[in-house]
Image (tube, rainbow, N blue to C red):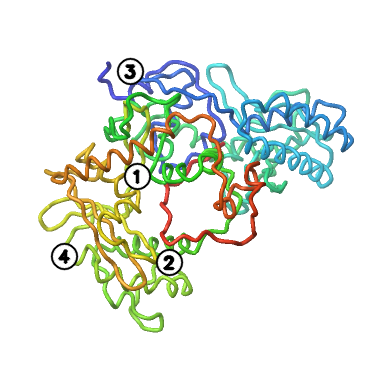
Amino acid sequence: MSTQDLREQVQQHQGPVRVSATDAESHPAHCGVFPAAKVRRRFAVDGWKRRYGDEPFMLGVIRDIIVALHRDARIITWEGLQEALNEQMARRSDNLHPGQRRYVAHAVEQYMDAHDELAAHHGEMRFLAPDPSIGSQDREVTVWGLLYTSADGVREIRRLRLKRARSRAGEHDRWATVAGYVAARMQLHFPPTGIRVVEVGLLDGSTEVVLEHSREEALALYDAHGRPAIQQLIAPTRYQPGHSCQNCKLAGRCPSLQDLTDCLGQKRPGPSTRSVSAADLELYSKCPARWYLETQCRLRTEDNPSEASDRGRAIHQWLAQAHARGTRCTDQDVAPPDQEGIFTGTLTPDEYTKAREFLVAHARSCPLADGAEVIAVEPPVYGYDAKADVIIASRPDLVCRDPSGRIVVRESKTTTQMPADQSDAFDRFFPVPWLINIARTAKGAFGESDGFPRIELEVITPDEARVFAWDVERDQDMVRMAKAEVRQRASAWIRDTTWSPSPGAQCTWCPVRRWCPDAADIDCRTGEQPQSHDEPCAGLPAGSPE
């Protein structure tokens, strides 16, 4: 196995390079090695190869059906469109999840309606091709989208959005800049008279024009903003673990990932390389279909969180901002809103008022009260389990060092009912065994220390806050229980490829129930909330599905 720095392997690779508009859109704060490896089409890291599953790329299925419909003369009538769409769905949906099938059919209909509305507003557009590109096979710039042209020479590229079109008025858009450049440079029979980039929301058929320029303006905009962005991402720079790890060609060898081999307790890997967090396993245990449609397909459509979830979000937001100051939380910080000197952070007055009784309880048990040193607030911790072939993600609320020098990893949870004891707290809040397992697998996962970290759970109610602690180094029985809990939750998830639903009362408030056929048999009363007493487990931010 090569000991060469992975960045050198990427830099020295001589194969073809294909950069997409989506690549150029990558935020500069993200990993600088992931996109450099991604655009090198044939690059593979020495000693490891990502394994891909056979799950369909849902937006790709939608795009392929739209292309087929554009080439079908029957779509000039509503009846013909429905007939053609049904035929396409029958041909292409065999390997789609039932929830995906519902969404795909809905999305295609919404797109065709949006197509007609765009034609009414801008004039008829003739479909040219999907995924336009320029350059050679060795050096190529491409756009994942649909290209059209008008009779008078305006070229229009459309980007598909899973939910709603997003307006970016007054904000530079690198995706649109690269897309406009590709449209302007494509060699067709006639030069373009104008360039337009449009977003289409597949949830509601919404449309937004995000760029509209002459050919010359589109080329100049690319030279000023698009080309520098592409040059930056082609050169591998710094490692930065994050949501891109789940799709990275280097993850199994990345030096920035913690070695968490055997953390999930699996004897063999599942059908493909995957990534997982505590929130994933907690959600999967409630309903595999919901986990798949919500986290993998990004089909969450309902924005109606429970009171516990809303409350927990506000409290965690306040805690993160308060602890970032590096000092303990005081009674003055959480005084009534009409007093001076309170700390509200970015909470609105209404959010602060609703959260205040929990914050008052927290101030009495703030971990910084005893002179602890803040190491990181909500640090994203990523690792790789080589046995399971899984990227593992975690984000504890606070990592600090106590006066003795020991690392303390603290998770805070809000609830209306305090756990009866430490055993009850362990059983109720899955982040506890999850963090214990990570800490025991990799001693330095949360910070360098001579010994293993201490795991703490702060449970906050409106009346009190209690801190439960687990000694990872000394309590071997507790470590075995944590490993068993994680192993049991991960064993079904890692091998699942069907993501079957678990219908029940939860369908009433499920955020993807609109797409789940099994939820149709449940009496879904609009606005009803889950009877949850505990704040749900929070996951890490997800990347773009496009």
Q: Are marks 3 and 1 in contact (CB under 8 Å)?
A: no
Whether pointer 2 and pointer 1 mark residues with C-beta atoms closer than 8 Å, the reply is: no
Residue 165 is situated, as x and y percent measured from the top left of the image, at 65, 48
Tell me which label, 4 or 3, sits earlier in the chain. Answer: 3
Which badge, 3 or 2, comes first in the chain's sequence?
A: 3
Local crowd size for mark 4, using a 10 Å CA cut-off: few (<14), some (14–19), many (≥20): few
Of badges 2 and 1, the one in the foreground is 1
**Mark 3 packing: few (<14 Cα in 10 Å), some, or many (20+)?**
few
Residue at (59, 35) in percent of width and height: 178
Q: Earlier in the sequence, mark 2 or mark 4?
A: 2
The local secondary structure at tag 3 comes to loop
Secondary structure beneath label 2: loop
Q: Residue beneath label 2, please? A: 346
Q: Amino acid at mark 2?
A: Thr
Q: Nearer the viewer, residue 508 or 43?
A: 508
* Residue 495 picture quarter: top left
Q: Quadrant of residue 469?
A: bottom left
Could you tell me residue 343's position as x and y percent?
Answer: 35, 72
Marks 1 and 4, the one that precedes in the sequence: 4
Residue type indicated by callout 4? Asp
Q: Say if 128 sits above or below 112 in the image.
A: above
- Residue occupied by mark 1: 394
The residue under label 4 is 370
Residue visible at 32% across and 58% down?
412
For residue 47, the mark is: 3
Q: Which sits in the foreground, 60 or 281?
A: 281
